[in-house]
Amino acid sequence: MKSLDAKLKRITSGKYKPSDFIIADAKDPEMSAGVSSPGPRDPNDPSKGMANVLEFRQTIVAVVKHGIVDVMLVAASSLEAVTAKGIFKKSHVTPAIRANDATDIWRARHSSYAKEMSRPFRTANLAHCRKFADLGLYSVTFNNDLDHDYKSLLAYNDFRIDAAKNRFRHFLEVFNPNAPQGLSPDQVPAFVNDNILRTVAGMTKADRPLFLKMPFNGRRWMEELADYDPELVVGILGGSGGTTRDTFELLHQGEKSGARIALFGRKIKLAESPLDLLALFPRVIARDLTPEEAVKSYHATLAKKNLRAVRTLDDDQQITEPVLEGYGR
């Protein structure tokens, strides 16, 4: 049994311990942007340009071999390429693909698609992807516009029918509105929570997502969603790169508020040493280290390896994401 399945079983049976917290690396940026997707070759030296997709896939292999993560989420093309290396055969890591690529994640240079209301779209062919994985991420964005939200849910229904036909499991990502209609910022968390619960209410276990991936909108709203249905496992996405303190704070606050999965992309990809960053995740989740202590430990490791930090320790200790500020320990 893969570690994901074992942990989900314990979480949904009410036997959760911090060691059951699920860690996923979201290395699927090709489904969003183009040349910039893999990130810089050297975070400290922009002149070295962006890594290419072959270099990026080597980081996927490295993280899987590292062994900290439970799920590796990638684009179908990358999964096909890295699976050929045999890295998942004896690994506890579950491979997953991004199963749809709605327009709100389209971020080609000079484009404005992401500013318009999300429209459903799906590139991945599940019949072909099933040769490499049996798990995929499906994303939906509600904008409080009946026509657009209705079409998004129709497309999600079609996906689930296709997934059942191909014996393909999925988890559901629900973004905050990218072009909200008639919603103030303080109304967004409640709007998102209610739409998630309404969406899954009509599904049997055979049809339901294994877990959720969503923004952390604050302790109150995470607790509300996590408390509603213990069998609905909630995961948090990482969002922007931010500081190292932001990364560890999000882990700490999310887990303490009821999240049971972290699915981080840029927060891992843009780190000076992604594997050393990941190595600290379990200790923060277990509360062996506070977020502040974890940042100090990470910087000490960088210094020991003669890796130059992008920020000074003081700057990297700053919380820059407003939703993480003012959280009681």
Image (cartoon, grey):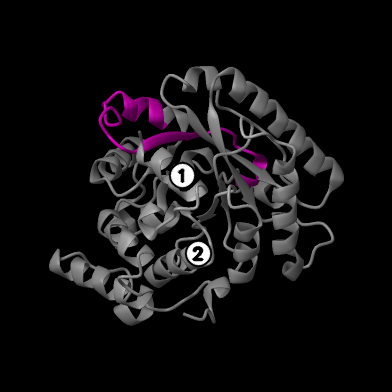
Residue 259 falls left or right of residue 143: left
Circle 1: residue type: Leu
Circle 2: residue type: Gly
- Residue lying at 79% horizontally and 36% vertically, measured from the top left: 151
Q: Which residues are magenta?
A: 78-105
**Mark 2 lies on residue:** 254
Residue 112 falls left or right of residue 60: right
Query: In the rendered image, which quarter is residue 92 located in?
Result: top left
Label drawn at residue 271: none
Vertical arrangement, residue 42 with respect to residue 135, above or below? below
Residue 292 percent coordinates (x, y): 35, 77
- Earlier-in-chain disc, 2 versus 1: 1
Vertical arrangement, residue 66 with respect to residue 125, above or below? below
Q: Can residue 184 be seen?
A: yes
- Residue lying at 81% horizontally and 39% vertically, measured from the top left: 150
- Residue lying at 49% horizontally and 18% vertically, measured from the top left: 128
Residue 130 percent coordinates (x, y): 47, 21
Q: Nearer the viewer, residue 173 or 91?
A: 91
Secondary structure of the residue carrying tag 2 is helix
Q: Can residue 43 be seen?
A: no
| C-alpha gap between disc 2 and disc 1 | 17 Å
Quadrant in the picture for the N terminus: top left
Secondary structure of the residue carrying tag 1 is helix
Q: Nearer the viewer, residue 3 or 65?
A: 3
**Mark 1 lies on residue:** 8
